[in-house]
Image (spheres, grey):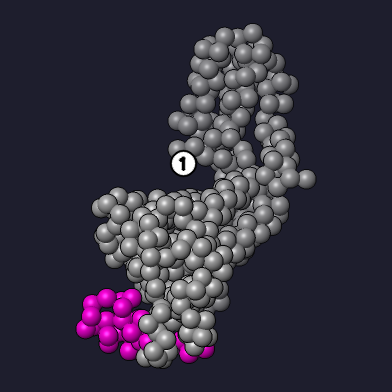
Amino acid sequence: MIPRYTRPEMAQIWEPENRFRIWLEIETLACEKQAELGVIPTEAVQVIREKGDFDIARIDAIEAEVKHDVIAFLTSVAEYVGPEARFIHQGMTSSDVLDTCFSVQLVQSADELLADLDMVLESTKARALEHKDTVCIGRSHGIHAEPVTFGLKLASWYAEMTRNRRRLKAARESIATGALSGAVGTFANIDPVVEEYVCEKLGLRPEPVSTQVIPRDRHAEFFCALAITASSLERIAVEIRHLQRTEVLEVEEFFSKGQKGSSAMPHKRNPILSENLTGQARYIRSFAMPAMENIALWHERDISHSSVERYIGPDATVALDFSLRRLNGLIKNLVVYPDNMLRNLNQMRGLVFSQKILLDLTQAGVSREEAYRMVQRNAMKVWDEGKDFQEELLADAAVVEALGEEKIRESFDLDYHLKHVDTIFKRVFGG
């Protein structure tokens, strides 16, 4: 990822220093258990633990010659450890180190993302409660439908992010496995208890059947969880972008003092944060497909997945981390315009109450088909001629005969549409 969209806390997880430090810990822990089993001398483990280290520049130089990153790493470590280094990597294969390390890094990343989601949930809940009764128009197909509240929109976002958190938590658990099972996963040259010991120390579980690699359906689940979360971010971002349009202006991204919206037009205040989140979501979603394609490897393993994962591991997690932090700030600082919401709701001169009139007519004994025709003929006058819906209904003899003038007026009541807002909020937030 480029620095513009990278938080240091997430980037650090994918830095070579952290990766090689995890590799060294995997190798050292394996040596500890091998010593307990009498495979290698106890004295050697003490030396490996005390002297074990590496030099990143040296690893790069060795890899340029040998064309193998794990061998380059082991050679660098051996230069620090000395003769006892011959006991490192006993019975192991490169994938034992690479895959187990990748799992650790994905778990570390997941923990950062879960913390990000918690912040988003907290901010979204606070704004939802703030605007629980802020009336606005609900839209379908982009067209005015019926009244809702802005708090209900936020509650919907909160509920969806709660599901994303649950998915990511499950994906974290799924990916938290390690493998130290040898060349084709049979433990021919290493005891399974070594794998169990190393995994326990690293906070992982042993992979039940690892062939030579951890099955990639686990990784696909992880990256799909990220992709779904990113898509939810985009849903929120697109909603904000629509609501910020000049002719709508129901909400607006916070515009700081000194901020500039356009190099050409000094008046502009653009929804750049939401547009950025839309772009980030497209990017993060793109990693789900290669992650799924990585599931099908040849026989016990090949390395067709390897180059892909070197990209998507850091890029997807770094991008989602940035996006969640950006969304959190966007929601916390979002400017809401209740007066504009009410103005827009009334823009169509009462049409939003058409369904209530339709149902009233059916309750009064009119067939649904005829009731629909009665309501629609008056509604179309509002669309085509700019009439007032209630006035047209009161001037329609058939409607008045069926309902009476008082009943017609009573049906134009916002509270009717919002009477179950508390019920929905209890479902989402409890209490």
Residue 266 shown in magenta: no
Q: From the top left corner, tell me how far across and down residue 324 is, in percent.
A: 52, 63
Q: Is residue 342 left or right of residue 52?
A: right
Q: Is residue 428 left or right of residue 233?
A: right
Q: Which residues are magenta?
A: 49-78
Instruction: Count all numbered tags in the image, as a single digit.
Output: 1
Q: From the top left corner, tell me how far across and down residue 368 is, in percent.
A: 55, 13
Q: Quadrant of residue 361?
A: top right
In the image shown, does 91 or 52 lie closer to the viewer?
A: 91
Disc 1 marks a residue whose amino acid type is Gly
Q: Residue beneath label 1, please?
A: 142
Near mark 1 (Cα within 10 A), the count class, few <14, some 14-19 or many ≥20, is few
Q: Is residue 394 above or below residue 152?
A: above
Taking the spot 68% from the left edge, 22% from the top edge, the residue there is: 408
Taking the view exactly as shown, the residue that stands out farthest to the right is: 431
Report if residue 315 is visible in the image.
no
Q: Is residue 287 above or below residue 267?
A: above
In the image shown, does 189 or 345 lie closer to the viewer?
A: 189
In the image shown, does 351 or 227 lie closer to the viewer?
A: 227
Taking the spot 46% from the left edge, 77% from the top edge, the residue there is: 40
Residue 69 shown in magenta: yes
Taking the spot 70% from the left edge, 31% from the top edge, the residue there is: 416
Q: Please identify the quadrant where the N terminus is shown.
A: bottom left
Report if residue 298 is visible in the image.
yes
Taking the spot 41% from the left edge, 79% from the top edge, the residue there is: 87
